[in-house]
Amino acid sequence: MRDEVFCAQYQRAIELLGSRWTGVIIRAQLGGVHRFSDLKAAIPGISDRMLAERLRELEAEGISRRVVVPEMPVRIEYHLTDKGRDLSAVLDAVVHWLETWSDAAPAPLIQRS
């Protein structure tokens, strides 16, 4: 029975998505927030160090990619990959669960261009 319940891949996915700030970073990127400073502004309470660390983790997992825009001054943006955008359904399910079971409604996802 224990082998039927435990799945190492599932555990890895839950630990990745359950890491503090990861879900909100992905949600912000789904909403069109791509620059470091804009992500920082969109996520109250996150430090520069933590944001940079989580973005590196997401890049290492193939969920987000760092894009250097060659203009003066150089602009760095973070865009979700297909793998990252595919998490939209997962986050939508979490929002649905929250709307069903929480007294407080989640904040709307702001779409930016």
Image (spheres, rainbow, N blue to C red):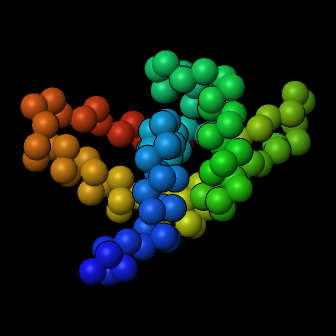
User: With 9 as the anchor, is 97 left or right in this view?
Assistant: left
In the image, what residue occupies the spot 89% across and 30% down? 72
Q: Is residue 62 above or below residue 47?
A: below
In the image, what residue occupies the spot 77% across and 38% down? 76
Check the picture and name the quadrant holding the N terminus: bottom left
Q: Please identify the residue farthest to the front as the structure is shown.
A: 2
Front residue of this view, candidates 74 and 23: 23
The percent position of residue 74, horizontal first and vertical second, equals 86, 33
Q: Is residue 37 above or below residue 92?
A: above
The percent position of residue 47, horizontal first and vertical second, equals 60, 21
User: With 59 as the anchor, is 96 left or right in this view?
Assistant: left
User: With 8 as the anchor, is 6 left or right in this view?
Assistant: left
Q: Is residue 37 above or below residue 6?
A: above
Front residue of this view, candidates 42 and 56: 56
Quarter of the view holding residue 89: bottom left
Q: Is residue 8 above or below residue 70?
A: below
User: With 87 as the anchor, is 39 left or right in this view?
Assistant: right
The percent position of residue 10, horizontal first and vertical second, equals 43, 68
Q: Is residue 12 visible?
A: yes
Q: Is residue 32 visible?
A: no
Quarter of the view holding residue 82: bottom right
Tally of numbered discs: 0
In the image, what residue occupies the spot 82% across and 44% down? 68
The percent position of residue 28, horizontal first and vertical second, equals 48, 39
In the image, what residue occupies the spot 49% across and 43% down? 19
